[in-house]
Each structure stands twice: as structure tokens, then as C-alpha cells.
Amino acid sequence: MDERRWWKESVVYQIYPQSFCDGNGDGVGDIPGIISKLDYLAGLGVDVLWLSPIYPSPGYDSGYDISDYEAIDPRYGGMEDFERLVAQAHARGLRLIIDLVVNHTSNEHPWFKAACSGKNDPKRDYYIWNNPAPGGGPPNNWGALFGGPAWTLDEKSGQYYLHLFSPKQPELNWENPQLRREIYAMMRRWLSRGVDGFRMDVISLIAKPDDFSDGPAGPGGYFDPRARAAANPKVHEYLREMRREALAGRDVMTVGEASAATLEDARRLTNPRGDELDMVFQFEHMDLDGGETFKWNDRGIPLPRLKSVMAKWQEGLAHRGWNALFWNNHDQPRMISRLGDEGEWREASAKMLAVCLHMMQGTPYVYQGEELGMTNMRFTSPEQLRDSESLSAYRRYVRDGDIPEGDMLRYISMKSRDNARTPMQWSAAPGAGFTRAAPWMGINPNYREINAEEQLGRRGSVLNFYKELIRLRRAYPIVVYGDFVPYAPDDPRVFAYLRVLDGETLFVCCNFSAERLGFAPPDGFRDAIRDAGALRNTDASAELLLTNHEASAYMTEFRLAPYEAVVIRKSQNQIKTKEVS
Ligand code: GLC
């Protein structure tokens, strides 16, 4: 068994502050609002809270463009509120990690303003500058993720600065040792305020490509330099230095957002020596429906591909690293709308997706509202959008005629990050219990049916199912530490796998379709299940640990209801006892 660590045994809950709970009645979520929901979170059973950025920001990229690393954005409260949040979370046994966004700053950060004041300013080298191409224009053909070139001209000096996301998010130059020292000192100050670790934004990209030449042009006529940046081995040096300088001797957790990282990169980043990161978010499973127009299409994720990618990461990091498991976050549309069912089987599919993810090896992340089965929003006009990525894609693709307007709105309803950012649905009251004022972005009208208040008291709700799932993780170490073994990898409708640990096995099987299906268990399980199903015998070697279907027919007929998930446990020891007696 791998070394036991608390962050392997934890469930993390992600809070997107502006959409979580509005405590002061201005339509925007805030820290007092979060504090008022700590009992709810403790009741859910999660262990760690991850707060998306709460720092001062012009808000171009919803807080991921930071203009001051050392303060709290007044929209969310003040430092006293933050300190109260840490104390009150800790008092309930909840840990708190914060977002660390140090690949780039906002263009309104004082460092960048100083850097633009002149080529000789000491902060100039905190960013990445280049001269125009010989014939004029940007230094190379790199593109920014949010559209246009990855370089913007600083008129005053005649040089271009690099930005992999938007011109309002200039890239920091990690080659500069003074910059690195400032970042580590800033991290130590947050740790001394009691935070328990960091979620590190696009940390795989902090070392820029060594090779600044043009690359093969993709969507929009630009080369995407992210894979080249992620491949630069210097990221490992920087992270080891960060570990020594900012984190050594502290029992904290780190999770890195590893955009464009390969399995090999992730193995180094999360190696069990623990000198870089504890775990990473990889995106291969989220990007399976991408194409020429990036994510803007209605292609859908093919289940067999999803299964093989998940299995690749499960097996690839086993004993050599650690997975962060997620279906949702603030950058992804709601998974239930992608792979589940928004209609008749909404609750069943929400629970099935939860089982499928939480029973894999790794640390599971629950994104706010996922525990209620919240769905995508139906956007009917660009005025409803707040996300700069979606807005700029809308303008670009529609203007250039690459995607007709009606199709683009449909794709946005399916894929926009704003689907995750609609306010949390606390109750059926006006404002969904999120706010008493006009909310900063539209609330999904289905809050009258889908909300926490309704689910808290209802047996069989998605929320109560999550509690049960989280409880199982505590009760059975195999859920955390068992090895993952794929089962029936080519089945197009059922995602099944085994977990194995010290003579014990879990069989997890999830129906990703709205059909009733017969699905045979692995040989070693067949008789055990028959025994248990037929005899309802508590001594039987197999037991049904969890199902999302009230009258499951799996143990007697090997039949799965629409979107049914079952978890069956078999223990070798029990079999032996039976054989002996
Ligand atoms: C990460 C964040 C995303 C942000 C981007 C640039 O991917 O999760 O929200 O837009 O970094 O900071």
C-alpha cells in the first residue's frame, strides 16, 4: 500500500467565491457568505475547501488576473473576514487551501506597471519581453488561449510582452530569482495566516519554452505554445525550489493545474518523494470533445475514449504519483449535462457520475453545486455571458464566419465556463438563497426544483447520496488505496472497473445510458454475488456497498437500471472462512 497521507484520504470541495453565497446583499458572493455555509460543508463530510481567487483583481478573468497578491478584494470582504474564515473552518475540522496564480499577474499589478515604466526598471525583467519580428509585428506566431496573438506591443518601449491567456494577463518571468523569492515570501505569509496549502493555477506553464521559434499553426492561424512550455524541465527545478523555500516542514497540500502536461510530466510532478507537488489536475479526459474550433462544437465525449483515458491516468500514476479526480470545476460545463441526463434521469445520472469518479484512485474534488446535481444554463443571448473566454470566442468565430451565430450560442450553452459559474442554488426563494439583490450573473431558473434546502431533508437526494459516498471513503481504505483494474474496457455504455487491495476487491459498475442493461460481473464475482443476492446472507463473500437505485436488480439478475451505479465488495477472507466452515 502507498504511504498514507491525509490529502489522499480527503475529499476537496471547490468554492467559486463570487457565486457561492452573498453575505452582504450586493449580488456578489463573499467571505461572510462562505462562513455562513461552513456548517453545510462540514455536514457534507468534505475535508478540504479550495477557494478560487479572493485577491484584488480588475476581474477581466474573474479573479485569475490578480493585481495584489497580499490582500482581499473588497468585494469579498477584508483580511479580518479571511482570518475568521480560516479559524471557523479549522474549528469544524475543515482545511482551507487557496488559489496561487503565479504564472501571470494582471496588467494592473504594480509590478507590471513598473515594468512598463521603462526598460531599466528593476521590475522589467519580472515579465517576458521580445523585439518585433524583423519585418515588424509580433515576435512569432504564438497564439493566446483567449484569442489573438500571445504578444502585445508596449508602445512606449517598442517591445512586445508575452501572455499565454489574454493581454490583460502578462506572463511572469520565472528565470528571475528575485521574482521567485518574492513569490515564496508571499506564500509563506499566507501559510502563516493558517492556510493549509495551495491550488496552483497553470503551474505546468511557469517555465516558458526555450525555443521561441514559430510552431505549426492551429485554430485561428496561431501556434499554441503551451505544450512546449509544459515540456521545459525547468518547471521541476522551480517547484523543488518552491518546496524548499516556501513549504518545507509544513504539513500542507499542493495541487497543480497541469495544462498540457503528459503522463510522464505528471509522474515527475507528483513523484512519491514529495519534492514537487502532491497531485495534479490533468485535462485529457475533459478535452476529448475538442476540435478545429477548439472546444466550440457539439461533438460530445465518447465513453470508450473516456474510459481509456481515465484508465491510462489511473494505471500510469499508480504507486508513482497521485491523481486529482474531477468532473467539474469553474472552467468546465456541468458534467451532468455532458455525460449524464438533464431530464428524467438527472438525479440518477448525477449520483452515477459521482460513484464513477469517487471510486477511482485519487483525491476527489466536488465543485459547488455538483453535490446537488446542478446543470448547465441555457444561454439564449451573449448578454447573459460573463466569461471573457466565451465572449471573445463568440465575437471571433461569429465575426469570422467560422461558426453561424445560432450554432455558437448552442455550443456556448453546452461548453461555456459560465455554466459552472451561475450562482449556487441554496433554496427555492427568489435569488435562490444566494442573494437578496440582483445577482452578478443570471441564476439557472431550475433553482426552484434543484436546491440545497429541498435536498437536505429528502432521503435519496443527490446531496444525501454524496454524504454516503464520502462516508464510504472513510470506512474502507480500499477506496483510497486500492489498485485500479479496468473491466470490459470496450463496452460502449458501461464504465466498470475493479479496485484491489490486500485480498479485498471492489467492483464498480456504472451505466452511462438511459437503457436497462444486462452486464456480467467478472468471473471471480459471479458466484459471490449470486450467494449474496439470493441468500441476502450477511456472511456471504460479496456485499452491495452502494447503489443509486432503490430496487437494484444487479445482485440477483446482473441487470443495471438506467444510469445505475453499483459498488460491490468482496473479501477473500470471508470466502476462506466460508470454505473452512
Ligand atoms: C486557469 C484557471 C482559469 C483561468 C486561467 C488563466 O486555467 O482555472 O479560470 O482563466 O488559468 O489564469
Image: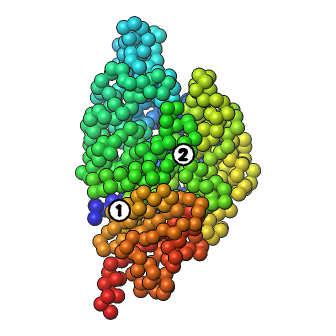
Q: Is residue 193 visible?
A: no
Count of numbered tags: 2
Q: Residue at x 49, y 38 (%)?
A: 290
Q: Please tell me whether residue 574 is drawn above or below residue 293 in the rendered image.
A: below
Q: Is residue 491 visible to the viewer in this orientation of the structure? A: yes
Q: Nearer the viewer, residue 287 or 317?
A: 287
- Whether ligand 1 has any atom under 8 Å from the Cβ at mark 2 is answered as no
The relative height of residue 254 versus residue 428 in the rendered view (above or below) is: above
Q: Which residue is mark 2?
A: 300
Quarter holding the N terminus is bottom left
> Horizontal and vertical percent for residue 62?
55, 36
Query: Is the CB–ligand 1 distance for label 1 below 8 Å?
Result: no
> Of 229 and 5, which appears nearest the observer?
229
Question: Which numbered disc covers residue 485?
Answer: 1
Labelled disc at residue 380: none
Q: Is residue 522 above or below residue 226?
A: below
In the rendered structure, which amino acid carries the disc numbered 2? Gly
Give the mark nearest the N terminus, 1 or 2.
2
Farthest residue to the bottom: give it.
581
Secondary element under disc 1, as helix, strand or loop, is strand
Residue at the location (27% across, 39% down)? Answer: 236
Q: Residue furthest right?
A: 430
- In this rendering, would 486 be left or right of 335? left
Quarter of the image with the C terminus in it: bottom left
Q: Amino acid at mark 1?
A: Val
Q: Are marks 1 and 2 in contact (CB under 8 Å)?
A: no
The residue under the point 62% across, 26% down is 398
Q: Residues within 10 Å of mark 2 (few under 14, many from 20)?
A: few
Residue 504 x/y as whole percent: 34, 73
Left or right: residue 393 compared with residue 171: right
Determine which quarter of the picture holds residue 437.
top right
Q: CA distance from mark 1 to mark 2?
A: 25 Å
